[in-house]
Image (cartoon, grey):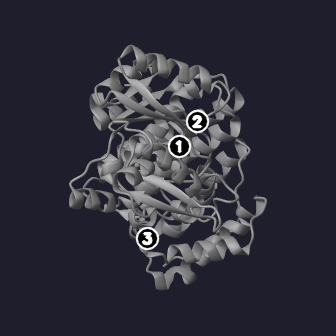
Amino acid sequence: MTDFEKARALLHEFKGNSYLFGTDVLPQVGQKTAAAGRKAALVRDTFAGSDDYVTVIRDSLAESGVNVAAEIKGAGPNCPREDLFRIADSLRETDADVLVSFGGGSTIDAAKAAEVLRTLDGEIDAYFGVGLVTEALQDRTKSLAAHVAIQTVASSAAHLTKYSNITEVSTGQKKLIVDEAIVPACPVFDYKVTYGAPADLTVDGALDGIAHSLEVLYGAVGKPNYDKIEEVAAACIGLVVNFLPRVVADPTDKEAREALCLATDLGGYSIMVGGTNGGHLTSFSLVDILSHGRACALMNPYYTVFFAPAIERPLRVVGRIYQEAGLTNADVEGLQARELGVAVAEAMFELARRIGFPTRLGEVGGFGRHHIERALGAAKNPQLKMKLQNMPVPLTAEMIDDYMGPILEAARDGDLSLIKNV
């Protein structure tokens, strides 16, 4: 079985026949939508070439007897609260019985959260955390409209997952809804839409996929489903490590583009069976200077060293992938604990250098001490507690300054020696 066949098999295992993915699948959207409702609200992104794809969607919906009740502009990067509220207000003006979103992670996340507000009202802050939407729906005997989520970027896998990330722009802080109730009923991803994606978006998205699988893998040690998580994560990380440099070298490489789509979808599989931790937690405090995927990817080598004594098995799996890709000559089988973590982190740095990606926060324009303080403060917020609990080396709020502080300082300077292990 090839790496591509393996990835497709895992995605079918994950989503069964509910997931429509591959090349040239967009014309089938109407059939999928008609099975869920007859009056749709379409929330859409606007980018170069997007009108052509939206025309295909509209035509497909019409042919299947689905009326578009409203067409709503999607969300900006990191899904600002203001965009969420605007989309929710527009949804309230419709009597749509099915929601169709077409966009990247931010627009799909906005559609998820906007439907929550349309159905349940209240303040969005009441739903940040785990399972609070489901709880409110049960209390009020209500249900959300079915969501047909059409992904346009190989990145967050928002079309497959239970997460909605919302940003308070004024404070530069992101918060998270985690709830099975907001998982889109009908996910769709036409890989052809990604062929023209800009270089930075492609790189950030692919590394976001790695971050999803990597962090879940690190946090899975000792858990009953570890073997499955390792299988999914290894497939995801291997595809990105081997094919991302090809896309950077030749953006028209369709095989490599497909590899990144499959990989980031597997990242979505990962975060539905396990949770992210350190890299994602810190990324929520860097939204004013870095994209989400870029922030996670930049931080994960440093968390790798911090977690290393507790994650030797995952580190060997990851180390072998980077070694086979020619990114390290380290003895990943013989090294142990922190030394193994440093070797894997250095391999991650080597991939970053080969694709022109930063390796330390100090390289990022606008970064300052206030970002470290913001990240430390956010880590103590009970609404983000799940990220601390998912860490393979769990931290309490009282340990944040002593241990997370040096990780952030190491990431600022690119100096792994600053990291303290528990």
* Outermost residue, top side: 63
Q: On screen, 152 above or below 355?
A: above
Find the distance from the CA under tag 1 to the CA under tag 2: 7 Å
Q: What amino acid is found at the position of numbered circle 1 in the picture?
A: Thr
- 414 vs 159, nearest the viewer: 159
Left or right: 118 with respect to 328? Answer: left
- 35 vs 300, nearest the viewer: 35
Q: On screen, 109 above or below 286?
A: above
> Count the marks: how many?
3
Q: Residue at x 35, y 17 (%)?
A: 64
Q: Residue at x 57, y 82 (%)?
A: 401
The residue carrying mark 2 is 45
Indicate the position of residue 387 as horizontal and vertical percent values.
44, 66
The residue carrying mark 1 is 107
For the question of whether residue 162 can be seen, the reply is yes
Q: On screen, 146 above or below 35?
A: below
Q: Quadrant of residue 129?
A: bottom left
Q: What amino acid is found at the position of numbered circle 3 in the picture?
A: Gln
Q: Which mark is residue 383?
A: 3
The mark closer to the camera, 1 or 3, is 1
